[in-house]
Amino acid sequence: MGEAVTGPALSGTQKAILAAYTELIEELGSDDVSYRVIARRAGIAERTVFRNYPTRVDLLLATAAWIEATLFTREESHSIFDIPLAIRGAMQRYDARPELAHVVAETAMRGVNGAAPSPGREQLERLLDAEVPSLDAAQRRTVVAALSHLDSAGTWVTFRREFGMDQRDIADAAAWAAESVLDSIRDRVTP
Amino acid sequence: MEEPVDTATAILASAAVLLRERSFDDISYRALADEVGISERTIYRQYPTRAHLLAALSNWIEQTRFPLPPFVTVSDFCAAVHERFRAFDASPAYAFVGARASAISPTLGTEPAYITRAIEAMLDVAAPTLNRRDRRRVAASLRYFASAMFWARLRTSFDLDADEICDAFDRAVGTVLARLPDATWAKP
């Protein structure tokens, strides 16, 4: 369930299905969209949608991954200390497409064992190892875990829902929290 | 746990029982109706969509399984969250439902969770002269690190156990609170 959702494995038909479903989620919400409507929008047979995505969960997981990979992309960060900026940008993109941000946030929490793997984790580890290699294992894990947790649609949903924040405030608070995490390692950088 | 008193609660109690053996996605309204001994229609009347059911189930689990101990000070707060994370770890299926429900588009008018208001009240007492923007940024960060989502992500993506998650939480909270100037903290 939910494998092979990103990368070159996606066929033209699959991309058309995911793009059509994405449009429809923004128009109608994720609950109300039937396979028939998706097929019509994508210009293919309903059967073809079922063949590619046998269940709604398959379809939803694939769509969320596709949305993250194409609409909520991050600019490449060259330093771990750029991450707050990347998070700020990501929060603004989530806020511009709220229906899709909810779908991504919820889908991230319905992997086979609960949460899906943290998407940016490897990049964060790479940057951290290059710039701040002196951290012990627990510190390294804490920084990576906190930053990858903050750099997710879950942040956007929580700040918006629990604090009624608008786009500016969400972007500001998420970036500020990421800066706090980095403050603890600023003086550990390798010259 | 006390006996369910009404249909809506009986449905949630049965859904919670089914959650022990399958995921939320695999609980059909049909199976749920059989478990409660009512018609599928009755369930639809109470919970028109699965999102409604998920939100209600999560609230109910939260109240019955994961009651949050009251807290006033920062250290009480950390202790309360530790207790919560340990309870999550003991009933992961329930905690995953909570993590997921907190991410869905709101189905009804939502109001801030109790923990959010308690965090804000704690900051008002602990750091009375904190400016509004910092207060909100700190409260939002503490809230998010205390969430079921944080627990779920660390457990699944980072393969951590409850003790390690509590440790990661303490460090994250420590870095956030360390940013506040000393002068804003109330003197004991």
Image (cartoon, grey):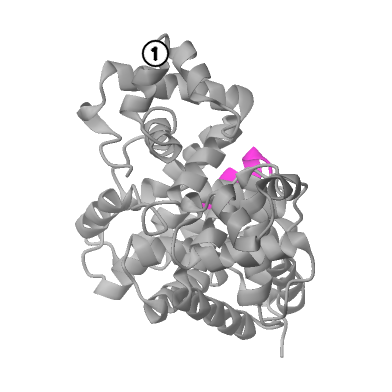
Kindly give the residue lying farthest to the top in the view shown: A43
Q: Can the viewer see residue B35? A: yes
Q: Is residue B63 above or below residue A99?
A: below
- Residue A169 in the magenta stretch? The answer is yes
Mark 1: amino acid = Ala
Q: Is residue A4 magenta?
A: no
Task: From the viewer's perspective, tell me whether residue A86 is left or right of residue A23.
Answer: left
Secondary structure type for disc 1: loop
Query: Quarter of the image containing the C terminus of chain B?
Result: bottom right
Check disc 1: other Cα within 10 Å, few if <14, some if 14-19, many if 20+.
few
Q: Quadrant of residue A32?
A: top right
Depth check, front residue: B7 or B123: B7
* Relative height, residue A74 to residue A14 (above, below): below
Secondary structure that dominates the magenta span: helix
Left or right, B21 with reference to B115: left
Q: Position of residue B3 (x, y in %)?
A: 72, 77
Which residues are the magenta region? A166-175
Q: How many marks?
A: 1
